[in-house]
Image (tube, helix red, strand yellow):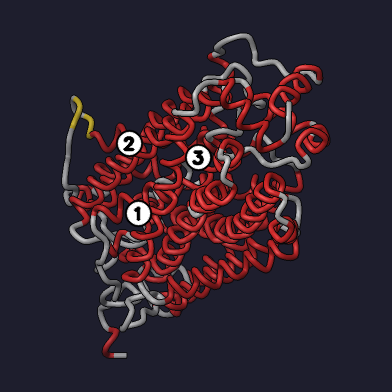
Amino acid sequence: MADNKGIIFTRRASGLVRELSWFDVFIFVVAGPAASGVVFYSVSTAADFPAANIPLAFIIGLAIFFPITLLVALTSATMPRSGGLYITVSRVLGPTTGFLSAWLLFIGYGISSGVLGYLFVGLMGSAFSTAALSSGIGWLAQAGAAMQTPLWQTIGGLVWVALFWWIAYTGIRRVKNIMRVAFFIPLVGTAIAVVWFFTAGGIDSVAAAFNNTWGAGAFQAIQSRAVELGWSAGGGFSTAATFKSLVVVVWAYASITIINYAGGEVKTPKKSMMRGFIIGTIFVGLFYVIIVLSTYSAFGDFVGSYDFLYDNHQAELVGIMGDAVQPSVPFYFMSLVPNVWLGLIVAVSIMIWFANSILPGFLANSRLAFAMSMDKSFPKALSKVNRRTGSPTNAVHLNAVFCAVGVFLMLLEVEVILSILTLTTFFIFWTYGLSAMLLPYHKPHIYERSPVRWQIGKLPVITLLGGFTFLAGWFFIYLALRNFSPVMMAVFVGVMLLGLIVYLYQQAKNRREGVDVNQIYNEIPPE
């Protein structure tokens, strides 16, 4: 007991290793949201929002998230510890609000990684099926069909969870090295697709290439059938439709702040966080806009026609093409490329964005559990760190369990799962924004650690950015609650109650052991 005297946190030092450079921060900022943004949302919103200017919507999304990521960079540089937004919220608004916000995020991120693993297997199967339909290769058709069944998507999703569990368990250095390689594979694949779209040679050439892949007259048949069934491009630009499309654009940027939860493993965090977040956010926004512009420059209004039939009349697509393939960048690329194997290789490389999104989530969530354990709000065992690898082993194991749960949940109603994930992952933004607003006034001794203390008039910039994030956070919650049903709300309340039980148990334990919780949350955790 004498060794623990004077320790207010679970450990005297975190035991984590600072391995990540500013470039690694940049990679995580880009890779975190890239799977949904590149593969899906950049090209799958036309039917839902006719007359919307999707490139403009992504620019608006960048305008929304840039102040948020700048704020995250500032607070991460001020409090460069694992736990990210949780550290800020718990130090300013108190342990209860901090824990509940982090608990919801932990559930959301954990399940999301499993969901992405499940979806990745199905998308790979879709790519194989597309290649088989356009080439007539039997084994590709069989493999693609199998990979799109719930059984093999579940098995494949669990294999992905096991792989990323092992990578995270072996330490931050291996995570860093794998991410540095894995980042460039889909980046190159996406760049090839973008160049191909921009140089496709006009709508007549695109239609001819599409027909060569999917059958004579397929391009024109899809357009005409969509119109017959009620599709309309909307007759020009619509401001209202563009703003409505922000519902999906927000999701495309959702995980852009994820690396801040591993702030305790970033070298020279005051410089690396600022540089990595700012450059990474601008890159993501421009990257999205270029992808959308390139796809629409090649396919034009056909994107909306195809999306309309896929969302509402898949049987029509099956009749025209032989299958209804989900609209995505890989699909459009494979539809134009005459060489089946080139199309498949590039499509698979683009889908590796999913792997790049899963690993940051795995890393961030285990560090979030570690941070709560350091504050004695989570079981002490979760702060255990492997001395050889610098990995919080038990926190990694716990996150793997929730990822596996996410895989199995995909066997249930997808709408329920995605709505719950939206609210759990976005809930923390309003509490974080409020915390940043109040930081200079409620915790001036922590604010003094900030690398920059800019002011506009008499107001600190961090307060202004916090106010913007606070409002954005409530906007995100509004988007999440729009599709909530009583069943979804009951599930959400149940998750909250479970978190409260865990929290109250830990606080009762702290009181029995004579721990001064207020002292813990008055300081940032040790390095």
Residue bearing mark 3: 252
Asked if residue 523 can be seen in this view, the reply is: no
Q: Earlier in the sequence, mark 3 or mark 1?
A: 3
Q: How many marks?
A: 3
Residue bearing mark 2: 282
**Residue at (65%, 51%) from the top-left corner?**
492
Label 3 or label 1, whichever lies nearer to me, is 3
Q: CA distance from mark 1 to mark 2?
A: 17 Å
Secondary structure found at label 2 = helix
Residue bearing mark 1: 260
Pinpoint residue 416: horizontal percent, then vertical percent. 71, 48
Q: Earlier in the sequence, mark 2 or mark 3?
A: 3
**Residue at (73%, 55%) from the top-left corner?**
141
**Residue at (53%, 22%) from the top-left corner?**
243
- Badge 2 density bin: few <14, some 14–19, many ≥20, Cα 10 Å: some
Q: Relative to residue 502, is residue 409 drawn left or right?
A: right
